[in-house]
Image (spheres, grey):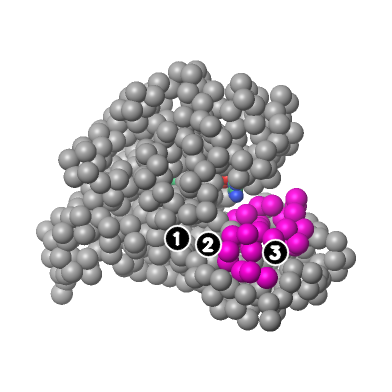
Amino acid sequence: MRETASHWKYPDGKLDSRLRGNDQGFERVRIPDETGAGFSHRKTYKLSSMTSCPSRFIAVVFDNWLLHTPRWIEVCLSQMGVFEMGVPTQTVKTAYDSAMENFDLAAEALDLSTNVRNMIKYPERILHVNLPVRMDSGHIQRFEGYRVQHSTARGPAKGGIRYHPGVTLDEVKALATWMTWKCAVVNIPFGGGKGGVTCNPKEMSLTELERLTRRYASAILPLIGPERDIPAPDVYTNSQIMAWIMDTYSMTKGYPIPGVVTGKPIALGGSLGRNEATGRGVYYTVQSAGEHLRVPIKGAKVVVQGFGNAGSIAAQLLDSNQAYVIAASDSRGCVYNANGLDIPKLIMHKEKTGGVVGMVNSETISPQELLALECDILIPAALENAIDATNAGAVKAKIVGEAANGPVTPEGDAILEKNGVFVIPDILCNAGGVTVSYFEWVQDEQHLFWEAQDVYNRLERVMKNSFAEVLKIRLDRKVSMRTAANMLGISRVAEATALRGLYP
Ligand code: NAD
């Protein structure tokens, strides 16, 4: 018998036991709430350790927990087709499934042999760490963390560290895989890596975050180093966290080693232009796509999903080049103004209030409405799987610039391609961040630092040349931009691997 929504009772973990029983869905769900009235922000609401649930959903749940009740989550679950009143109705693809699928598409197009595929497709090394951390209350809380090195064929592994409640090994593997192809697409001498800790930094004090970071840095210490694996910031990590990692690593070695991380504060060997590099790179590739499609930036209507580091800076550059950013969102909601939002004011508003909602001269719209807005350029800059089979058909943008990693699923991709939407794939579009990370590492190694304009000029050259190379493959081989970018990245890794040979 199929259960109905009204049978779902809160609190006391009933939802917990229901979902845990369904191994196609949540592995562990804990939603304690003594009042039954909804979420209380004093509690930890963990929907984590997912095995086969899309991280987009986890993000939606986590990021909206202040606004929505568990009833809303339940509705959302069934609307997404993950569960129909507690019964799993589909096996949901994970980010890693998407990464593997995209690899296969490009490998087919490149006619790569099985031998080469076996050498380059899978992560080289995976470290799963247990992180006991003393919290401010005195108790010790356990977190889990990961560091994955997908490839070191072309150089040291390179990739960010994510702090988020939805972090899973599967997600980190996917992100590490994308880093390998991304570094190869922009032709910088790095492989791919990624790290993450399953935690909710929004619920942690600064001192707790520091203790967690130092413990995580110690735990992954055997893998990292300027010649081995160089972390950087990602979602909910920043330059301060990089400074703590640099310090922990340096204290252990006995001398300062700034090149162990990038995205550091300038005072510790960070690079000018690193903070805005991803957004700036997004801007350069969107500009190139606009030139190719004859969609001028001036007067273009832009929608940004995820007004964080990457999204807000891309918005700022587009706005200062006379585009109209008509909508923007973050984890708390979406704002819209048909005549264009005042972006400098929106940035200040978000800094002051923590979110975009409540901005003057704006109306609130739903996340679904935001993705379906009539616009020229859509920039998904939040998390994975934002655009999938369920909503890709509603996208009306001419250009989708993937500032986020993996924001479009393979099914979503096929729909966008069929509808003539020009997608600038993540491994090209957001590669500005890792490109300037490379510049930072070079500066650290040489102890010689560059002017901001020098960084911007070099970045523009790298992004525009890479865009042109990917576009050429698309046009020559009649494949999507994503397959073209994967073909470029994968062929470079395959070449390096073949030249190095198989050891032993
Ligand atoms: P960030 O933490 O600065 O910003 C993320 C933003 O997304 C936040 O404003 C958050 O509120 C918002 N968000 C979260 N869930 C959302 C949801 N469901 N709907 C709408 N908004 C939501 O992180 P960032 O560094 O800007 O990273 C964003 C994306 O860009 C990630 O996919 C990341 O991997 C990718 N990326 C970042 C960099 C970089 O250098 N920062 C480089 C390459 C790729």
Which element type, helix, strand or loop, lies under badge 1? Answer: helix
N-term mark: 2 or 1: 2
Q: Is residue 75 magenta?
A: yes
N-term mark: 3 or 1: 3
**Eyeballing the image, is 216 above or below 304?**
below
Query: In the rendered image, is residue 161 in sight?
Result: yes
Which quarter holds ligand 1?
top right
Q: Are marks 2 and 1 in contact (CB under 8 Å)?
A: yes
Indicate the amino acid at tag 1.
Ala
Which residue in the protein does label 3 denote? 74
Nearer the camera: disc 3 or disc 1 = 3
Which residue in the protein does label 2 denote? 54
Which element type, helix, strand or loop, lies under badge 2? Answer: loop
Q: CA distance from mark 2 to mark 1?
A: 7 Å
Q: Residue at x 25, y 34 (%)?
A: 468
Q: What are the residue bounds of the magenta stretch? A: 58-85
Q: Residue at x 76, y 62 (%)?
A: 71
Which residue in the protein does label 1 denote? 95
Q: Which of 343 and 217 lies nearest the eye of the viewer?
A: 343
Could you say which disc has been placed on residue 22 in the image?
none
The answer to whether the residue bearing label 1 lies less than 8 angstroms from the nearest atom of ligand 1 is: no
Indicate the amino acid at tag 2.
Pro
Q: Position of residue 480 (x, y in %)?
A: 30, 45
Q: Is residue 65 magenta?
A: yes
Q: Position of residue 383 (x, y in %)?
A: 52, 50
How many badges with numbers are in the image?
Answer: 3
Q: Using the rendered view, name the quadrant where residue 3 is placed.
A: bottom right
Q: Position of residue 434 (x, y in %)?
A: 38, 44
Which element type, helix, strand or loop, lies under badge 3? Answer: helix
Q: Using the rendered view, name the quadrant where residue 116 is placed.
A: bottom left
